[in-house]
Image (tube, grey):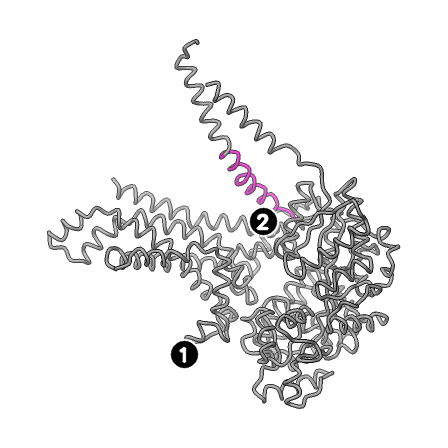
Amino acid sequence: MPIKGPRDHRAQKALTYTLFLALPVTFFLTAYVYAVGYTGFVSLHSWDGISPTMRFVGLDNYGSLMGQSRFWHAVANNLKWLAFYLVAPSTLGLALALLVDGKLKGEGVIKTLIFLPYIITPVAVAAVWRWLYLPDGGLVNTVLDGIGLSGVASNWLGDRHIASYSVMAAALWSTTGFSFLVFFSGLRSIPAELFEAARIDGASAFTIFRRITIPHLWPSTVLVLGLFGIEAMRLFDLVWSMTGGGPSRASEVLATQLYDVAFATFQMGKASAIGIVQLCLAAVLILPYIAYITRNVEEAAE
Amino acid sequence: MTTLKQNALATGAVLLALASPAMAQEAEVWTYWASGAEANALTALIGVYDEQYPGAPIGTRVITGNTAEMRRALQTAFLGGQPPAVYQSGMAQELKSFADAGRIAPLDDVVSDVPGFADIADGVRRVVSVDGHLYGVPLNLHVVSNVFYNKAIFDELGLEVPTTAEEFDAVADKIEAAGYQAMGNAGGPGWTLYTFYSFLYNALGQDGYYAFGSGEIPFTDARVKAALASWTDAYADHFMDDWTGYTWSDTGAKFAEGEVAMYQMGDWLSAYLADAGWTEGEQYGFFPAPGMDGGVVMQMDLMALTSGVEGKAAEIGKDFMRAAASPEGQAAFNTVKGSVAANPLASSAGYSAYGQAAFEEIQAASPRGAVVPNMKNLLPVRLGDEFGTLVSAYAADPSPEAAEEMLETLEDMRVEVKEAGEFVTW
């Protein structure tokens, strides 16, 4: 049996790498690059999605979007969701992680209870919360009535002024478990000696939190905020299942509007334009943020 | 290393197999009837098909969801060259968009000799035809212009069934004075609009109703304005509290619990009430929405035959359409689903008490051409969608200013849509 030289060996390694990479690269090119490119192409056309031919309309779909209050309302809602995701479930997750971390009995059970909602599919979350929110006989209003707060009881999903916030409350319940778990693991990975040394040096609890806990939780924070930011921009299922974007489009976000425009009103070109704008908006809002905090994490790690 | 090369070859072979053309087409019917009475009704229809055309089975596939999901699935199927032989479609504009795109085949020659099919109601035929050619087999009709009412509440308050908008308004006032919710309604872009059709029909007349759906009557027409004002007084002002927060079935539950006295809804509500143990003529009754004057507003599901299927699958598709159009197929389907057959020769023997009454209502209206389609399906889709959304928003907080603003917005859109050539003359 001939002995193979290093050159053969390199070639074989290259072949191995190529084979392992072929599938993900093919998948990325067809399911992402091609799909985005094709969506961009469709966005320049008028097409009902069914006809064999499309009519080129240039940037008309984009122009028409820019002039529609419906579109801007959805953009504003996405921005509200972004603010919500970056603040509420992340802060609550952090607070719960700090509260639970080594301080409570039955920690395992509490951790499971907090994390449990996160593994429930959004459609099921929506079904449960729709039921909780029923104006008459729903648990939320019943409890409010019971404790003498009937003035606060509302038509949670049917009032156009509060429907989005009501969905956000359901999202808070559903997603806090994720940030909790990430922060909790982050807390557990901080070396105990640091806290010990700080205490010996006479640092107050607040100083320890500010100078040790927070900086060491930075990688967890990057992960949580980054993923929540992306979630806010691509949000679809919870809104669609709870309100369908209503009442009267009040809780509509870009993804639900895209779906409605594409498949309920047959305007694939305009829907594709919404998709492209959504992608650009997500990129503009989230990429610099991720780049910025990632750089800071690297600096902190050095 | 030989093993590595063998693995590479095997991987390549698998990838090639994945990329190769799919197997020969099998005839399938795609519907979104996923479970319960709907799925059982389809099984019953396929049973009739198997009896009429033995030895050529047709497969079924459920596309979970609604017309939008079906459209999404069909879009992918057409792009991939693998459409089903037959699929469940909506009527009018929905059907037209597929016919205009050349994706569905005309059925004039396919079902012309099916007994009774030539006598389907004129209003039904209009919305399954495009440019004078038949493109869909109407399978099941649903009346959406009936008002269900709680007989116990009506008896308790000594109320008569109202026939005009004024009488309806007076009855609703009495019901509210007795502490009940007068009129059920549900959130979403469709249900509220459906309740407006009878007022539109009454104001515009039968021909005017079609003219409005064809884009020939402005939203700012005095008759439309008057219809909206009358509907606001009789209906919108009497909708139950917080209706925007309920689905149609949530409100159905409130009706069945005796909290709501009247509820205008499609006749699928009768199936819901049957599950709650209610029978037509005993716990509840129904009456035509005020102003219908013997007319009926209906919507339906229909079957369309795609034009991209060839060979045996295409023949099976055509045979299935004949079975679906036949009196036997229609009777089998509708008795199970709880809807009403479009083919007047279909036996109504298995219908519920409500189904029997609705069938008779349609048969009585049909000779006068007074079976009219759901307006939302006649209008170009984006206008229909806007109409439903705005009427629902208006009903939540009605005022003369809001009415004026809504009609002007819709009129601007009507003009734009008309200029774009999207209206159809029905």
Asked if residue B116 can be seen in this view, the reply is: yes
The answer to whether residue B5 is above or below residue A122 is: above
Q: For the residues marked 1 and 2, what is the alpha-carbon distance in whole angstroms?
A: 48 Å
Could you say which is closer to the camera, residue B221 or residue A233?
Answer: A233
Q: Position of residue B248 (x, y in %)?
A: 60, 69
Magenta stretch: dominant secondary structure: helix
Please give the label number shown on residue A146.
1
Could you say which is closer to the camera, residue A27 or residue B232?
Answer: A27
Label 1, secondary structure: give it.
Answer: helix
The answer to whether residue B270 is above or below residue A271 is: below
Marked residue chain, label 1: A
Q: Quadrant of residue A114?
A: bottom left
Q: Position of residue A258 (x, y in %)?
A: 57, 54
Q: Nearer the viewer, mark 1 or mark 2?
A: 1
Range of residues picked out in magenta: A24-46
Looking at the image, is mark 1 or mark 2 earlier in the sequence? 1
Marked residue chain, label 2: A
Please give the label number shown on residue B75.
none
Q: How many marks?
A: 2
The answer to whether residue B333 is above or below residue B408 is: above
Which residue type carries mark 1? Gly
**From the viewer's perspective, is A295 left or right of B211?**
left
* Residue found 72% across the figure and 60% down from its top: B301
Which residue type carries mark 2? Ser
Q: Quadrant of residue B387?
A: bottom right
* Residue found 66% across the figure and 52% down from its top: B71
Please give the residue where the numbered disc 2 appears in the rendered image: A272
Residue A42 magenta-highlighted: yes
Could you say which is closer to the camera, residue A279 or residue B45?
Answer: B45
**Are the residues tagged 1 and 2 within 8 Å (C-beta)?**
no
